[in-house]
Amino acid sequence: MKIKNVSVFNQVREYVINNFGAIMSLSNIQSDLESKRGVKIKRETLARYLQTFEDAEVVSKCARFDLKSRKSLRGEQKYYLADLSFYFVLNTDNRINYGPVLENIVYRYARVRGYKVSVGRIGKLECLAANGNQCPRCFCLRFNFRCSKRASASSARR
């Protein structure tokens, strides 16, 4: 694939990597890029860029699924990183949100074990539904750990 505007491609890449584990759709990515960064991009171009990241195995797309009605929610998905180092290379500040990091680890674990994974909600809990050769499993993902590198380093010394 030939990329005409490398700057926009890099901004899309940065956006997806910085928001891994968040619910996304083409329209909300497009509107966020326009409103926050002033980047105008066509939906088709954005879809091609996202597919390029998937083909390069930088991210994996995980579709949203309504676990109650068993219907797929169209257009909404989450992107998980193939390797968390992609995120840490771009973000050198001292704040780590462990929620998306742990969610990414659970997702990657289920995929490596051969499960087909989708993300949905049961009540107020966000869950990964994994179906494979064995019985279906559900991993609940309500992680709200927030910590700075300095705080965790100082508490580890005590």
Image (cartoon, rainbow, N blue to C red):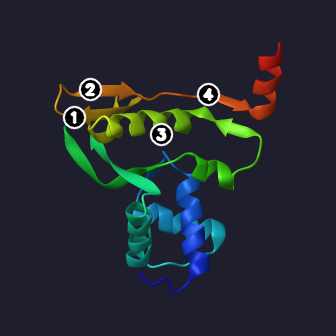
Which three-letter amino acid code belongs to the residue tagged 4? Phe
- Residue plotted at (42% across, 58% down): 57
Percent coordinates x, y for residue 109 in the rendering: 39, 34
Residue 120 in sight from this viewpoint: no
Percent coordinates x, y for residue 73 in the rendering: 28, 49
Compare residues 139 and 40 and report the one nearer the observer.
139
Which three-letter amino acid code belongs to the residue tagged 1? Asn
Disc 4 from disc 1: Cα separation: 27 Å
| Mark 4 vs 3, N-terminal side | 3
Residue assigned mark 3? 104
Q: Secondary structure at mark 3?
A: helix
Callout 2 touching callout 4 (CB < 8 Å): no
- Residue plotted at (26% across, 38% down): 114
Residue assigned mark 2? 137
Q: Residues within 10 Å of mark 1 (few under 14, many from 20)?
A: some
In the picture, measured across the screen, residue 1 lies left or right of residue 69, that is right
| Mark 3 vs 1, N-terminal side | 3
Which three-letter amino acid code belongs to the residue tagged 2? Arg
Indicate which disc residue 146 carries: none
* Residue at the limit of the structure toward the top, as seen here: 158
Disc 3 from disc 2: Cα separation: 16 Å
Callout 2 touching callout 1 (CB < 8 Å): yes
Residue assigned mark 4? 145
Which three-letter amino acid code belongs to the residue tagged 3? Asn
Q: Secondary structure at mark 4?
A: loop
In the picture, measured across the screen, residue 93 lies left or right of residue 126, that is right
| Mark 2 vs 1, N-terminal side | 1
In the picture, measured across the screen, residue 138 lies left or right of residue 9, that is left
- Residue plotted at (77% across, 18% down): 156
